[in-house]
Image (spheres, rainbow, N blue to C red):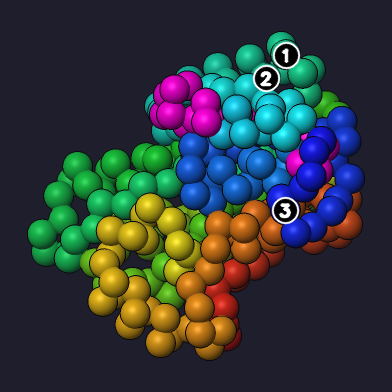
Amino acid sequence: MSEKQSRMTVDLSGRVAIVTGASRGIGKAIAVSLAENGAKVACVATSVGSVQGTVDEILALGGEAEAFGCLVGETGAAQSVVDAVLAKWEKVDILVNNAGITRDGLLAHMTDEDWDAVLETNLRGTFQFTRACIVPMMQKRYGRIINVSSVSGLVGNPGQANYSASKAGVIGFTNTVAREYAKRKITVNAVAPGFIATDMTKVLGDMIMTEAKKRIPANRVGEPQDIADAVLFLASDAASYITGQVISVDGGMTA
């Protein structure tokens, strides 16, 4: 690799990772950080074209990556991606379920379509990819699964009943799968970002972000790399005895 951009150094040499929602923001930072530390990375987004920029950045840094396009909640889509990764690299060591969407609105005005779309991507997508990766991980008796939840899944957020429900579901899912597969040396943890400077939060506007910042003891909005660093640690061998946990990366919002 050429000069590193991530702030941490762990040894992921020979590891194979899948990162969903890797086209931008948090997912891109995670994918690049894993690659910088030696992992081969399958970068997943809704289309190959949308995530090719992440792959190109990894390749420019001297890493190894490939782009995959799929709708994460669609039946069979996750299995197809995992099968392709296994055909190319023969294993899956790390799975980061990061893909997520919002369809915000107060409950009284929330449509069935907005509810279903968010739950399908954020929660069903996490289920689909985790299920597809569990068997090859069990066969190797090794796995690191990191699910990206949200502080909204811990404390709720007005106007985000669907999003908060999906992210709370991710936490419950994480706890259960961690218990099911700990004996197979597979760890399953969640990271719960607070307000992070991404395209998803930009749409909230300056006024809302200014008010949000007042609620953050660290007095700053987080950066995608803050989440990538937490994921990088959980993906490493240093976190082998940590499973079923939720790490809030929120500048103290939920302290």
Give the x, y percent position of residue 54.
56, 34
Residue placed most toward the observer, 145 or 62: 62
Q: Residue furthest top?
A: 87
**How far, Cα to Cα, is label 2 from label 3?**
25 Å
- Label disc, if present, on residue 57 of the rendered structure: none
Which residue is painted at 10% across and 59% down in the image? 109
Could you tell whether 57 is left or right of 164 in the image?
A: right
Residue under the point 78% across and 23% down:
91
Expressed as whole percent of the image width and height from the top left, the position of residue 191 reads 61, 60
Which of the two labelled residues, at mark 3 and mark 1, occupies the earlier sequence position? 3
Please say if 118 is above or below 8: above
Q: Residues within 10 Å of mark 3 (few under 14, many from 20)?
A: some
- In the rendered view, does 208 fall on the left or right side of 154? left
Q: CA distance from mark 2 to mark 1?
A: 5 Å
Q: Nearer the viewer, residue 77 or 18?
A: 18
Which residue in the structure is indicated by mark 3? 6
Q: Quadrant of residue 79?
A: top right
Query: x and y percent of residue 240 in the render?
Result: 86, 54
Which of pointers 2 and 3 indicates the residue nearer the eye?
Answer: 3
Question: Is residue 208 something one can see in this rendering?
Answer: yes
User: Which of the two discs, 3 and 1, sits closer to the camera?
Assistant: 3
Q: Which label belongs to residue 85? A: 2
Q: Is residue 134 left or right of residue 221?
A: right
Instruction: Tell me which amino acid carries mark 2.
Output: Val
On screen, residue 57 above or below 155: above
Local secondary structure at mark 2: helix
Return the residue at label 1: 88
Which residue is at 65% across, 54% downward? 228
Q: Amino acid at mark 1?
A: Lys
Q: Which residues are magenta?
A: 36-53
Q: Is residue 102 magenta?
A: no
**Element under disc 1:** helix
